[in-house]
Image: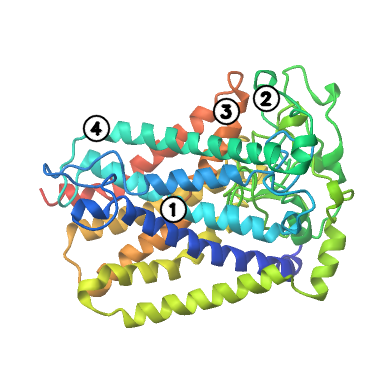
Amino acid sequence: MSIGGSLKTFCSRETATVLLQLCLWSELGVLTRIYLDRLFNDACDGGWGLCLTSDKTAAKQYGAEFFDLPANMLGCFVMGYLSTGAVLGLKSKKSLAILPASHHFQDEKELQVGLRTGYCGSLTTFASWELSLLQLLIGSKGGDGGQWQQWLWGYIIGFELAFASHLIGEHAALGIHRWLLPEGSQEPETEVTELERPTEPQEEGEDLYGTDELKDTLDGNHNTQRHNRPETRQDRNRDGKVEMPDLERPTDAGEEAEDLYGTADSHQVLTASRSQQIDIDSQPRADVQNRTHPRHRAHVSHAKAPHGATNSKSRHSGLSARLPLTTLFCALLCFVLTVLWIVLAILDSERKHSGRRQQWFALLFAPFGCVLRWLLSKLNTKEYRVLPWFPVGTFTANMIACCIDFIIGGLTNRYSLGYWPMVILPAIRVGYAGSLSTVSTFIAEVRAQLQGWPEKVHGYWYPFITIATGNVLGIALYGWSVWRSL
């Protein structure tokens, strides 16, 4: 597609609506994370709440229960809770399994991207996790290094609790569908049991979170019937690998797993290319999409939408005439909240309350990190991958955020900075880098890749490479601030 066509697509109303949702929900995600941190930490310093994630003890040692552990757990739970029917193996391939198929939110693709990529992706943060645990190993101002046991334990509990939270969220969504929704009680058992789950991940390009409709609109490609083609044995070669026709191979992957930036497994779409794109902050699409059973396949038909859902053309032709009330409400709320943060950042000028001012600036920086993560999701496509199973977009977003955290952490640890640097730099770390990095998408990608075990070990290599690279960058960008002061 030409540059002019790409620019036209990027400036379209649908893309503007996605950006609006990302801005709103990223602010709410960071706000939730900030107050969860306070809830589980302030009591350690004599404040309100609980003392569960303190970063210091009487011995000036950091703990493995890092600040953002509760936020990462909640974000991963919500990501799993917002799963589509296809991800949960339901007969009805709904965009939101927790709602009736006829609910109008099933067609609000932009809102779903906002919730999954914007809220869940910004609520969770990988960079803060890396910095907190690196300080256990290296040390910092007020904390001793060399705590390799706590460092290792912090990764174990951080990863496993986030993974378990995502799984529990999926189970909660499945329970609501089965026990509380009318169609759930009438629907037979899911298409395959856990014991029957195939070992190969799903085909690349399948939409596990129902965002292909949005993607097709942004890309100008409405020919989505290819997702309805059932897989046959002829699609497999002698090695047991799924062979995909070129039309089914996405060229772009974009904030959460399915749409890697906005839903629990594969969550977003962004580019103007005609090939399909997947978002980064939802669940991983790459390897999730080679599974052979319908339970794990996201065959979302837009030409013939299930349960009365509207297809892409009819829905967006109506959108061209008027904006949905949901979009108008979100636009108004985003405007009001942004103005509120600006006013509070200006008025809350007492030096003893600099921490509150950091909070308001962090909320203003949050949308920029979230949108960049969404844009980087394009790197998740096969076109940009060095390894076909490795989600480059998610990895790049997390590593950039880690570098920002390490540099800011090193500066604040080594030097006594003035008032404004101590307000702005931590705000950038909490708001911008916190929204740029994500654990919810990272966990969703790992969960999807683990479906290929034991034939494929990608689900273990990916988190190992990500965590190890983060530590190497941390030693290079943060370690100097500790060792130079010795």
- What is the number of the mark on residue 200? 2
The part of the image, by quadrant, that contains residue 351 is bottom left
The answer for how far apart the CA atoms under marks 1 and 2 are is 31 Å
What kind of element bears circle 2? loop
Mark 1 or 3 closer to N-term? Answer: 1
Q: Which of disc 2 and disc 1 is earlier in sequence?
A: 2
Which mark is drawn over residue 450?
3
Amino acid carrying mark 3 in the image: Leu
Q: Residue at x 19, y 55 (%)?
A: 45
Amino acid type, callout 2: Glu
Q: How is the image coloured?
A: rainbow
**3 or 4: tag closer to the N-terminus:** 4
Query: Dot 4, how many residues are within 10 Å of its Cα: few (below 14), some (14-19), or many (20+)?
Result: some
Q: Earlier in the sequence, mark 2 or mark 3?
A: 2
The Cα–Cα distance between marks 1 and 4, rounded to whole angstroms, is: 25 Å
Identify the residue position indicated by label 4 in the image. Answer: 148
The spot of residue 223 in percent (x, y) is 86, 51
Instruction: Check if mark 3's residue and mark 4's residue have beta carbons within 8 Å.
Output: no
Residue at which label 1 appears: 400
Residue 430, percent from left and from top = 37, 59
